[in-house]
Image (tube, helix red, strand yellow):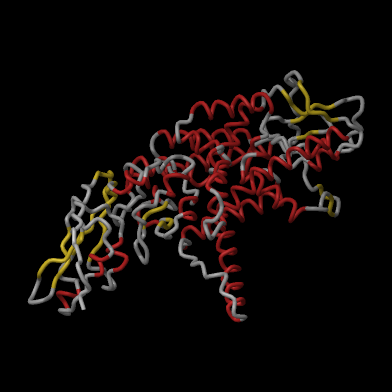
Amino acid sequence: MKKLHLLKGLRVVLAILFFLPILLFFVDIRGELPGQLHLPARLQLLPALLDAMNGFFLFWLAWTLVFGRTYCSVICPAGILQDVINRIFCIGKKKKKGVLRFRYHTPSNVFRYVFAVVTFGLAVFGVAELFTLFDPYSNFGRIAANLFRPVVQAGNNLLADGLHQTGYDSLYHVPVASVTVASLTAAVTALLLFVVTVVFRGRYFCNTLCPVGALLSVVSRCSIFRIVFDEKACLRCRSCEYACKAEAIHPQAMKVDMSRCVGCFNCLSSCRQNALSYRLAPLVKKALPVAGALPERRREFLATGIAVVSAFPLALAKVWQKKTGIPVIPPGSLNLTHFRDKCTACHLCITKCPSHVLRPAGPEYGFDYLLKPYMAYIDSYCNFECVTCSEICPAHAIRPLTVEEKKITQIGIARFSVDLCIVHTEENDCGACSEHCPTQAVHMVPYKGTLTIPQVEPELCVGCGGCESICPVRPVRAILVEANETHRTAEKPEEEEALDIHIDEFGF
C-alpha cells in the first residue's frame, strides 16, 4: 500500500512544482518574481507545436507512449486546476443518496476524435480559432490573467488603502487596466466550463473537448506502463471506479481505458486490497463492455454532427468577417499573419507588460483575432527599451528581440491630423507628442507667429505610441499610430553632437 501512495504523492508534489510557478507568474502584479518562473509554460504541448519545436513535441508523444497521459495531471495547468476544483467542490461526495461520485462511462470516441480532426484540420487551413478556444494552457492563462490576477490586484489596493490610513505607504495601487469585456467573458466561461464538467463528469473536458487530450489519447491507449488489475485480489468493491475522475475504470470487467486515464493514481490509493498496480504490462486486447450504450452512442453521433456543422461558420467568419482596421501588434511579432496563427491568447504577455499597453482584443479586429493582444495606446505606450513580451511568449508568436533590435523595429507609423491639433483649433502651444517621442520622429516646426506644430518623420517612427497616449485631444486624438501589417526597420535617429563648453568663471 505504501508504494501505491508513493506514486500518488509523487504526482501531487510534481504537479505543485509545475503549477505554482505558472500561477504565481501570472498573478505577480509587481513584476518582482524572476523570469525563470515562466519556464514551465515552455513545456506546454500546444505552444510547442505552434512554435515548431518538433523535438519537444515528439518527446511528449514518446513519454506518453511509455508512461501514459501523466502530462495531463502533472504538466498541464488546466488539468491541475480541475483537480483543485474537484478538491474544493467534490470532497466527501463519493456517494450521495445512492448516486456515485464518479462512475464508468463509455468513451465519446467518435465525438472527441472527429472534433479533434476538425480542430487540427481548420488550423492547417489557417483557421486556428478552435485551438485558441479549447487549448488547455491558454484557457488557464485567460482565467489566471482575467480572474485571479484582478482579485490579487483588488486585495493589494484595499490593503494599500488601509495601510495609508495608518500612515504606512509601503504598498501602492496597481491598476486593473488589462481586463476587457471580451477577456473577462472568456475567462468566466472557461472557469464555469471547468467547474460544471468537474462536478458532474470529472475530467470530461480533458477527454472530450481538449485537442491536446485527444492527441495524447491516441498514443496513451498503447502505453507500455499502465494500470492493471489483479483479478484474484479484486473484490469488485468499485472504490477505484468512484475515485477515477477520468471515468475510465470498469471494475466488473477489470479493465482500464488507458486512452482516458490521466495518470493521477487516485485509484491505486483507494484500493484496500492492492488489486491495482501501475506496471509494465501487455496491451489489453479485451474490449470494455458497452452494454446499454446505444442511447449514449446516438447522443454522441448527434453531438459529432453538431461539432462538424458548427465548424463551417468559423471558416465562413474567416472569409467574410468585418474588421475596423489592423491591430498594432507587439515588437517581435514579425507580421500579422504570423502572430495571428501562432498566438493562442494565453495573455501571459499582457500580464507581464510593465506599461500595461497590451490589451486583449474584442471582435473589433475580426473573429480570428479575438482575445489576442494588441497595443492600446489609451493611457500608456510601449517602453522604448522593454523586450519583456518577446522573452516570455511560450509559443514564440512574439520572437525574442534584443534591446537594440527593439529600438529600430517599426510596428507602426504615427499619423498627424493638423485639423484636430489644439495648436490649430485653439492656437495654443502644446508639443506634448514631441516631448514623449524617443526617436525624434515627432518634432515641432514653425506654424503661426511664435506657435510651433508637430511634424512626423515616418522613417524614424517606431510606432511606440508615446505621442498618441499623451495627446490631449478627445474623443479622436490628433496623432494616431497606424499599424504596419508587416514590421519594418526604422532609421536610427542622429545623435546630437555634445558641445565642448569651457567655463572660466561663474556666470553671475
Q: Position of residue 69 (x, y in %)?
A: 66, 33
Residue in front for this viewpoint, 96 or 283: 283
Residue 4 versus residue 279 in the image, above or below:
below
Residue with the most extreme top position: 282
Q: Position of residue 317 (x, y in %)?
A: 37, 47
- Residue for point 43% across, 37% down: 122
Residue in front for this viewpoint, 295 or 453: 453
The reply, left or right, for residue 258 in relation to residue 330 is right
- Residue for point 30% across, 52% down: 326
The reply, left or right, for residue 424 in relation to residue 25 is left
Q: Position of residue 155 (x, y in %)?
A: 61, 68
Residue 157 versus residue 312 in the image, above or below:
below
Quadrant housing residue 45 = top right
Quadrant housing residue 465 = bottom left
> Which quadrant does the N terminus fall into?
top right
Q: Position of residue 223 (x, y in %)?
A: 68, 24
Residue in front for this viewpoint, 475 or 487: 487
> Which quadrant does the C terminus fall into?
bottom left
Residue with the most extreme left position: 449
How many labels, in total?
0
The reply, left or right, for residue 96 in relation to residue 43 is right
- Residue for point 32% across, 53% down: 328
